[in-house]
Amino acid sequence: KAGVTQTPRYLIKTRGQQVTLSCSPISGHRSVSWYQQTPGQGLQFLFEYFSETQRNKGNFPGRFSGRQFSNSRSEMNVSTLELGDSALYLCASSFSGGGNEQFFGPGTRLTVL
Amino acid sequence: GESVGLHLPTLSVQEGDNSIINCAYSNSASDYFIWYKQESGKGPQFIIDIRSNMDKRQGQRVTVLLNKTVKHLSLQIAATQPGDSAVYFCAENQGGTALIFGKGTTLSVSS
């Protein structure tokens, strides 16, 4: 069974731009969660989608948004990029989320200049 | 083997030793806990999980212990190998859909 895939793996943007990251979950998984990982803050929950609906949201500004498609693939968007948005963005999929085993993708490394 | 009484950011052990990595979790209502291993350039990899109705669970060379009284979780790795070198994170689920991650511990195994 193929794992969680994320594209692109690396991205360089400048302040003020916007970016869209993509995540394809494991086949059959309906929950996709997004996390931001930085050296200072560690792994922080952004949001979770289940059956095309945002089910939970972390404490991030509205510049961070996401969506999920009918095939469970998910995208996250960050608008008006700031230097502090430089991070590894990780996507995790699970059958139903939360209290079930979550499988992570390799992440997208975003650098904001 | 070496153990860490409190969370420390790094742990160095010799190949063949047993390693113990500790984690304090935040919410007494958390009902599901997971240990992840993250190697450089990769996403976190599931190691083992435990639910709050258990106090111990064993996997292949790994054991997780849960002490709900003091809100403490530990990961024991038997016969540590160089391939075990990585950053280890504990995560808790508080009944919702998000995982709350602890600060990681970098395990270095020397041969």
Image (tube, grey):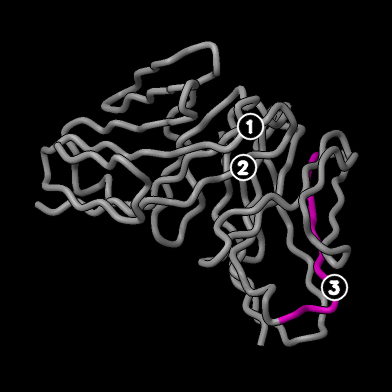
* Location of residue B77 by image quarter: top left
Q: Which residues are magenta?
A: A72-82
Residue B93 marker: 1
Q: Where in the figure is residue A30, as x and y percent of width and height?
A: 77, 32
Residue located at (56% from left, 45% from top): B101
Q: Are marks 2 and 1 in contact (CB under 8 Å)?
A: yes
| Left or right: A113, with B10 as reference point | right
Residue located at (59% from left, 64% from top): A88
Residue A79 marker: 3
Residue located at (35% from left, 18% from top): B58
Residue located at (84% from left, 55% from top): A66
Q: Is residue A22 magenta?
A: no
- Comparing B25 with B109, the one in front is B25
Give above or below for A28 relative to B7.
above
Residue B25 marker: none
Q: Which residue is mark 2?
A: B100
Marks 2/3 same chain:
no
* Marks 2/1: CA–CA distance: 6 Å
**Mark 3 crowd level (few <14, some 14–19, many ≥20, 10 Å Cα):** some
The subunit letter for the residue under badge 2 reads B
**Mark 2 crowd level (few <14, some 14–19, many ≥20, 10 Å Cα):** some
Marks 1/3 same chain:
no
Q: Where in the figure is residue A101, as x and y percent of width and height?
A: 58, 29
Q: Please state which amino acid type lies under the numbered disc 1.
A: Asn
Q: Please state which amino acid type lies under the numbered disc 2.
A: Ile
| Left or right: B27, with A96 as reference point | left
* Marks 2/3: CA–CA distance: 25 Å
The subunit letter for the residue under badge 3 reads A
Dot 3: what SS? Answer: loop
**Mark 1 crowd level (few <14, some 14–19, many ≥20, 10 Å Cα):** many
- Comparing B107 with A20, the one in front is B107
* Location of residue B60 by image quarter: top left
